[in-house]
Amino acid sequence: MSRRERGPEPGSGGAEATAEDAEPAEPDGPEQCLSLLPWDRFSAWLHCVCVVGFDLELGQAVEVIYPPHSKLTDKEKTNICYLSFPDSNSGCLGDTQFCFRFRRSPGRTVSLCCFLDQMDRDLPVYLKKDSAYYYGYVYFRQVRDKSLKRGYFQKSLVLISKLPYVHLFRTMLKQIAPEYFEKSEAFLEAVCSDIDRWPPPVPGKVLQLPVMGVTMKADAQISMALPTVHEVDLFRCFCPVFFHIQMLWELVLLGEPLVVMAPSPAESSETVLALVSCISPLKYCSDFRPYFTIHDSEFKEYTTRTQAPPSVILGVTNPFFAKTLQHWPHIIRIGDIKLPGEVPKQVKVKKLKNLKTLDSKPGVYTSYKPYLNKDEEIVKQLQKGVQQKRPTEAQSVILRRYFLELTESFIIPLERYVASLMPLQKCISPWKSPPQLRQFSQDDFMKTLEKAGPQLTSGLKGDWIGLYRHFLKSPNFDGWFRSRQKEMTQKLEALHLEALCNENLVFWCQKHTEVETVDLVLKLKNKLLQADREHLPVKTDTLKKLQTHINDIILALPDDLQDILLKTGTT
């Protein structure tokens, strides 16, 4: 599928950037790691940049992969080829931007400096890198060109990344793609060289990211006032289904199978990304495809009728899907996304049997009955905004705040109950293994809702209990609970380490045999290794103190044991 993979030899062009160019290291951060190698900084943001063109003999083909050492399997290249061009029926003349997402091929590991992984741990869930998937950010150009046999120039510049930084990469492509189509590959090499000088994506910092003389700001904090690196224009995306936003929130929260049928990849990808983001700060844990085609490697898996539709959100544009996916329980049909010049009219939820083709009227086709009563206030507030010609950015802020408060009202009772499963600190003994978390009990949790349920923070009425019961069976609950379980288990390990540090370990060793002392040293070394490997939330001083304890214990042993223990590594 790839015709050529070009770029400078290793060490030239963008590969000049090394650790010397980095910003001053933060405490407990980069200084703990090896120096960054050429392309490490580039890899912190992007996997590679691809150029996809149309060849009369090959069809869509990857023309350039940059940097040249970037690895893509044939399956990944095929996915990129088909996902980088709109379906022929979309009729996208001119320039179009959209986003897609596809599975990474298994069995490949990417090694980066350890502090990049540590920084990823500190990011909010919706900004974390996606280790099993790649995002493709596309700038597609189709213009008439009589000098070409097909009569059209068709090409896409595609950024491949594990990061869900939709707004950032969209802005970046808008800056570089038009110039690339004029200047070609030398310009692309210079852009990649600039990215390899970017500081890493540090959480909580506003970063300056220069590209070809234009400096972009990447704000890695939650901002209610400005679009951040990951956000889409919520109000614009939800305009076609204005009156059903609360029901859509429930469907996404519960991980229900959803199809977005749209006229172009731009509309489908923006709407899917808006749906996924509406349950933020909760992470959407199922698969989602902002733009999905019949050529996708998971096409058969996701369209089969031999089993129930999977928990996934698909964005499609091909009319073929109107028939292929008509058995799916929830379908959103949208037309061209335009901001309303007048107040949108009430549109009822439509029955699935009425969805015959992709040309059916825009709306939500489902038989789902929401658990919660409709919140009329948010609808009135947004309608008033349309009447007063309130800017779309302000409307999106209102909508984002609404979704955030709704999700937090739902998740706080769960957070409160799960926190009660944590053993008390007095139960942690340095001489015993860390205690286990108590088991999650659905019945016990439900009992807490009467006095400490969502009614404390939300005025919405309805069947909250039914919504929780359904949610507890969903992939989103499973992903959320696994994450919380991991955090709490690591916290217990960290508290256990602190308890060990506060003991007089040398005095303990004086009262025990050499065999027991050696066993303790090996266990303490493994504890240090675990703290580093799992990035346990332990203070640097605690780790230094534990290392001092280990050294003091070893020095109190006979010389022959000292030599063995000082040389002994841990695995």
Image (cartoon, rainbow, N blue to C red):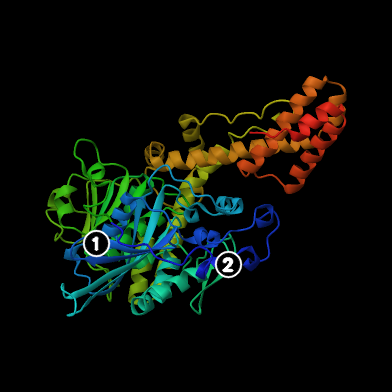
| Side of 194 where 313 appears, left or right | left
The quarter of the displayed image where residue 49 is located: bottom left
* Quarter of the image with the N terminus in it: bottom left
Q: Residue at x 74, y 38 (%)?
A: 498
Query: Circles 2 and 1: CB distance less than 8 Å?
Result: no
Question: How many marks do you count on the picture?
Answer: 2
Q: Residue at x 39, y 72 (%)?
A: 185
The picture places residue 304, in percent across and down from the top left corner, at 20, 41
Label 2 Cα crowd, 10 Å radius (few <14 / some 14-19 / many 20+): many
Kind of residue sitting beneath label 1: Gln
- Residue 366 makes an appearance in the image: yes
Kind of residue sitting beneath label 2: Ala
Q: For the residues marked 2 and 1, what is the alpha-carbon distance in whole angstroms?
A: 33 Å
Image position of 366 with respect to 81: above or below: above
Q: Earlier in the sequence, mark 2 or mark 1?
A: 2
Disc on res. 17 = 2
The picture places residue 4, in percent across and down from the top left corner, at 33, 62
* SS label for mark 2: loop
Q: Residue at x 49, y 43 (%)?
A: 453
* Quarter of the image with the C terminus in it: top right
- Residue 241 makes an appearance in the image: no
Image position of 415 with respect to 266: above or below: above
Give the camera-side residue of 344 and 452.
344
The quarter of the displayed image where residue 91 is located: bottom left
The picture places residue 446, in percent across and down from the top left corner, at 46, 34
Disc on res. 60 = 1
Label 1 Cα crowd, 10 Å radius (few <14 / some 14-19 / many 20+): many
Image position of 499 with respect to 377: above or below: above
* SS label for mark 1: strand
Give the camera-side residue of 427 and 198.
198
The picture places residue 114, in percent across and down from the top left corner, at 60, 50
Disc on res. 317 = none
